Image (spheres, helix red, strand yellow):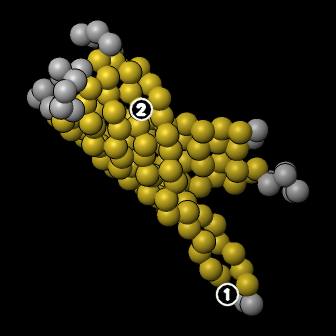
Amino acid sequence: MSRSFSVGPLAQYAGVGNDFLFGFSAQGKYWWDLPGTDHLAKLVLQGGIGFVRAGIVDTDSGTANTYGSFLIPIGVGVDYAVTERLALTADFLLNFTSLGETVRTSGQDFDLHTNIMPAFYLGIRF
């Protein structure tokens, strides 16, 4: 959209064994030049909104459960231009969701929610 602002998709995936987590969001990013780097390094702030899907297998019963929720990823990172068309990135994200499960105790249902999931990504932008 401009030299300092962009909008685009963000896909996140985490999988271990039979469990998985997949998130997709529309992100806005804003870049600030870091002083003394001749416009090569930039501080990046980002935020977005989307959805997340999680599949978890209970190893005791073998039952598979799938959960879905909204996803609000916000984060900060550093972007370093290696060439005009290639950059290395490091981003720290906090993913806000309402993923969780309902637990029954003393005849009442309680919703246990995962509110924040941190993530750290290293990447290449081209």
- Badge 1 local density, few (<14 within 10 Å), some, or many (20+)? few
Q: Residue furthest right?
A: 60
Q: What SS does tag 1 mark?
A: strand
State left or right for residue 20 relative to residue 10.
right
Residue type at mark 2?
A: Ala
- Badge 2 local density, few (<14 within 10 Å), some, or many (20+)? some
Q: Earlier in the sequence, mark 1 or mark 2?
A: 2
The quarter of the image holding the N terminus is: top left
Quarter residue 86 falls in: top left
The quarter of the image holding the C terminus is: top left
11 versus 96 height, above or below: above
Residues 60 and 29: in front is: 29
In the rendered image, residue 60, in percent from the top left (x then y), is placed at 88, 56
Q: Which residue is found at the position 65% from the left and 38% from the top?
A: 15
Q: Residue furthest left?
A: 2
In front of the other: label 1 or label 2?
2
Q: Residue furthest front?
A: 36
Q: Is residue 50 visible?
A: no
Q: Which residue is found at the position 65% from the left and 82% from the top?
A: 109
In the rendered image, residue 28, in percent from the top left (x then y), is placed at 25, 40
Mark 1, residue position: 108
Residue type at mark 1?
A: Gln
Q: Which residue is found at the position 76% from the left and 38% from the top?
A: 17
State left or right for residue 31 relative to residue 126.
left
Q: Which residue is found at the position 18% from the left and 31% from the top?
A: 35
In the rendered image, residue 20, in percent from the top left (x then y), is placed at 64, 42
Residues 81 and 53: in front is: 81
Label 1 close to label 2 by CB (< 8 Å): no
Give the CA separation, mark 1 to mark 2.
44 Å
Q: Is residue 107 visible?
A: yes
Mark 2, residue position: 90
Quarter residue 99 falls in: bottom right
